[in-house]
Image (cartoon, grey):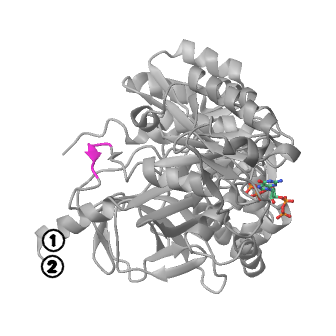
Amino acid sequence: MCPQNASVNLQEAIASRKTFAIISHPDAGKTTLTEKFLLYGGAIQTAGAVKSNKIKKTATSDFMEIERQRGISVATSVMGFSYRDIQVNILDTPGHKDFAEDTYRTLTAVDSVILVIDCVKGVEEQTERLMEVCRMRKTPVIIFVNKMDREGKDAFDLLDELEKKLDIKTRPLSWPIGIGATFKGVYNLFDKGLRLFHANKTKRETEVVQIDDLEDSRLGELIGDAAADTLRSEVEMVEGVYEPFEQEAYEAADLAPVFFGSALNNFGVRELLDTFVDIAPYPLPRKTDMREVAPAEKKFSGFVFKIHANLDPKHRDRIAFLRVCSGRFERNRFFHHVRLDKNLRFANPSSFMASEKSTIEEAFPGDVIGLYDTGNFKIGDTLTEGEKMNFKGIPSFSPELFKQVENKDPMKSKQLEKGLRQLTDEGVAQLFTQEPGNKKIIGTVGDLQFDVIQYRLEHEYGATCDFRHLSFHKACWLTSNNEAKLDEFIRIKQNQMATDKDGNWVFMAPSAWILQLEQQNFPEINFHFTSEFKREGIPSN
Ligand code: G4P
């Protein structure tokens, strides 16, 4: 293929891809909405398929057994489908707060998100945290207020709550007619169509009644005179209070369009999907420590944002999930692994269409592919065609829970070391080493990770361990332009110093108060709360 053609195809590929994540507090309806999207995309044929797939996985994998036992979605899965000529890639995220880091990392691999809110519960704790990450990254957000078939909060109150708690301007693009028992449907403020509600778990809702405007005499006949009056006055208020929808404000993550519906009843889902396809961004440029990389650049680049172990227990391999950022990824072609300074090629890269995994020949910006890994990858690794750069924004956060690992079976020390190394490469937790005595300390953001580590060490590596609680407050990475001061700090604080897996110094602050004190005492030292600093300030070649 001549290079000119290749570039045309690359452009076309970029202009036909949208990659996003659905995020929510657990139980708001993320899985149900994902499933309905997949139904529209023809990627699955029956409702229930996404959940039954979850169960199937748990039955075949030890790791997933934990997910089943806990009743939460530990893994982030990738699902793709085609809708109106757009290749839509959904990255699913675990809702449980102990796996928040996994979700944060997944958000580095998407170009926009749909946030699902339960209309009964409103904005919940996890919703706020997730939105903080979206704001930090300026990720465009569409909000779907779900479960309108239940007695929830008033729509205006919900919008106020969204604006206040999530610190973002909202703009309803649809408006609910009643709620719970009186829920009759939604009025689309954009195309002025009425979608009338019929509870229906499996079929797609089809009845769209086009009315000229809200004065249309059919409105009263369709929804009743009282509901029609309420709708008229509420819509008037919406148009008066909320600024018109602006694509630019949405793309800048300043404004979130809001939809109302019921994912379970398949209501309001199609207009959400249609609007998503209309307004959500195509693959966006991404920053590296050297420069910004545009998707249309001919040379391939991408980064690993997730590593998943032992999807199939018969194979010990892991799968590294890579987001393609620019150019064309090709099967069996050598690419440069920047951190290892090594060229690697991949014989069986896979793509994910709903529950199906299949080998691909090529992939384009916005795509997420699975690479079989025998231990070469860590979260955040970059692949290029040779250029030495690292994608930014895939940080490890300062952990807040710490436990020292105690080996229960000295005959299995090697297995334990290997297990700890591999599990922490996957990003399950962070590993620190303290001298003297080569003490291994695990740091996490949630308690559940300790269970996951213990379980997986035993089932995958044959190593058993106990944990001893350590009362550190935070681990912070240290840098300074003043080497002497840094050395002095490390010497004075040697009992609270450790190194991370890359040999960087980390201060294990015993309390918030002491941390603050040390920051004041040592103004020459920078205390970092994410590992992102490692990628900063690397001189360009
Ligand atoms: P999650 O992935 O965000 O954790 O939520 P999920 O989709 O699993 O939904 C959580 C629960 O909320 C499920 O009920 C689901 O059926 C229900 N749900 C989702 N959308 C709606 C909706 O529009 N209306 C109503 N009334 N319920 C909704 P469950 O009882 O926990 O599970 P299941 O037994 O129904 O599978």
Residue 538 makes an appearance in the image: yes
- Which one is nearer the viewer's eye here, 217 or 524? 217
Q: In the image shown, does 190 or 294 lie closer to the viewer?
A: 190
Q: Position of residue 93 (x, y in %)?
A: 63, 55
Residue 512 placed where, x, y %?
69, 22
Secondary structure under tag 1 reads: helix
Asked whether 290 falls inside the magenta stretch, the response is: yes
Span of residues in magenta: 289-294
Picture coordinates of residue 162, whole percent (x, y): 67, 30
Q: Which mark is residue 5?
A: 1
Residue depicted at 78% across the width and 52% down the height: 27
- Going by the numbered disc 1, the residue's amino acid type is Asn
Q: Dominant secondary structure of the magenta stretch?
A: loop
Few, some or many residues within 10 Å of mark 1 (<14, 14–19, 20+): few
Q: Residue furthest front?
A: 217
Element type where label 2 sits in the image:
loop
Left or right, residue 148 beside residue 396: right
In percent of width and height, residue 240 lies at 58, 21
Q: Which mark is residue 1?
A: 2
Question: Is the Cβ of the residue at disc 2 closer than 8 Å to that at disc 1?
Answer: yes
Does residue 120 appear to the left or right of 434 in the view shown?
A: right
Q: Is residue 410 visible?
A: no
